[in-house]
Image (cartoon, rainbow, N blue to C red):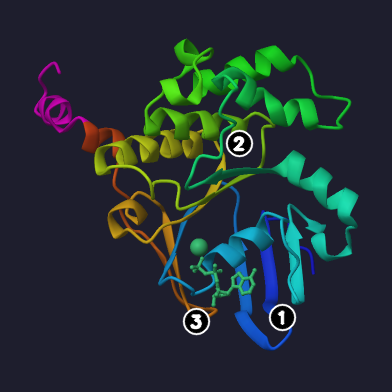
Amino acid sequence: MNDASAVIRTQSITKIYDSGEVQVEALKGIDLRIAPGEMVAIMGASGSGKSTMLNILGCLDHPTRGDYYLDGIHVNELDNDQLADIRNRKIGFVFQGFNLLARTTAFENVELPLLYSRRQDIGDVEKLTRQALERVGLADRAHHFPNQLSGGQQQRVAIARALVNQPAIVLADEPTGNLDSRTSVEIMATFQELNRLGITLIMVTHEHDIADYCKRVIEFRDGRIIRDQAVPRPHDAVRDLEPSRWQAASQGERP
Ligand SMILES: Nc1ncnc2c1ncn2[C@@H]1O[C@H](COP(=O)(O)OP(=O)(O)O)[C@@H](O)[C@H]1O
Ligand SMILES: [Mg+2]
């Protein structure tokens, strides 16, 4: 069944890892619907199936059973080439460990998905790369190497790389897991800004403080969804970074 109002729709997704002797049922029938423009936190204990779910949503892995529709496309029916193509067009990934190439500048790291793309309609690679770096506030660091950047800056390069193909969704697996708390809030400010621009975001986190910046929280336990709730008033990361300025503004003073 197709569903035009959902960018992601899964029906009874199960995933069994089979390593010969032992079978692990990592997902036990996941029904999920995510609309365009949502910002979702996936929570749950270690081993509850979060990364498995994200990898399936990102077309990095196949479910054992169940159906997955991404932006109206029935992913189950695609061959490996088509999967690679849909990943390239529709999905951006951000990982806990940034996963940047070390001896490669920020600009070149961000440019890479465009160079690998087999799309003919890609446009001006240099301009798209610059725009992605501007969006994460790193235009002035384009020619720095990863080891010349802070952890937060490296993660923002990784976010720019995820954005450069102008994907419909960005998936992030514990994107703040390696960062201190202030830097984590800065990353959430970047994500909230992107979400305001219309990008659908799904991120795994085990920190409640971080999930509070999202609009919806889905909790996994033992391969099942045990909670799926809207966040009534998501925190505003920019506001949390500059509380004094916001206080002054709300009292009618100049910041
Ligand atoms: N490649 C794999 N082979 C076998 N078992 C796996 C593999 N990946 C994950 N698992 C198992 O599947 C379950 C869910 O793992 P995972 O999705 O990584 O959980 P989480 O991200 O919530 O920590 C765990 O029991 C884990 O050990
Ligand atoms: Mg995980």
Q: Is residue 192 left or right of residue 171?
A: left
Pinpoint residue 236: horizontal percent, then vertical percent: 30, 41
Location of residue 212 (image quadrant): bottom left
Q: Residue at x 66, y 42 (%)?
A: 168
Q: Is mark 1 within 8 Å of ligand 1?
A: no
Q: Is mark 2 within 8 Å of ligand 2?
A: no
| Mark 1 or mark 2, earlier in chain | 1
Where is mark 2, residue-wise? Answer: 162
Where is mark 1, residue-wise? Answer: 18
Q: Residue at x 10, y 25 (%)?
A: 248
Q: Residue at x 49, y 73 (%)?
A: 47
Amino acid type, callout 3: Asp
Q: Which quadrant does the N terminus fall into?
A: bottom right
Q: Is residue 50 left or right of residue 83?
A: left
Pinpoint residue 186: horizontal percent, then vertical percent: 33, 34
Pinpoint residue 85: horizontal percent, then vertical percent: 83, 43
Q: Residue at x 22, y 38 (%)?
A: 240
| Mark 1 or mark 3, earlier in chain | 1
Range drawn in magenta: 242-255
Location of residue 118 (image quadrant): top right
State the residue lying farthest toward the bottom.
Answer: 21
Where is mark 3, residue-wise? Answer: 222
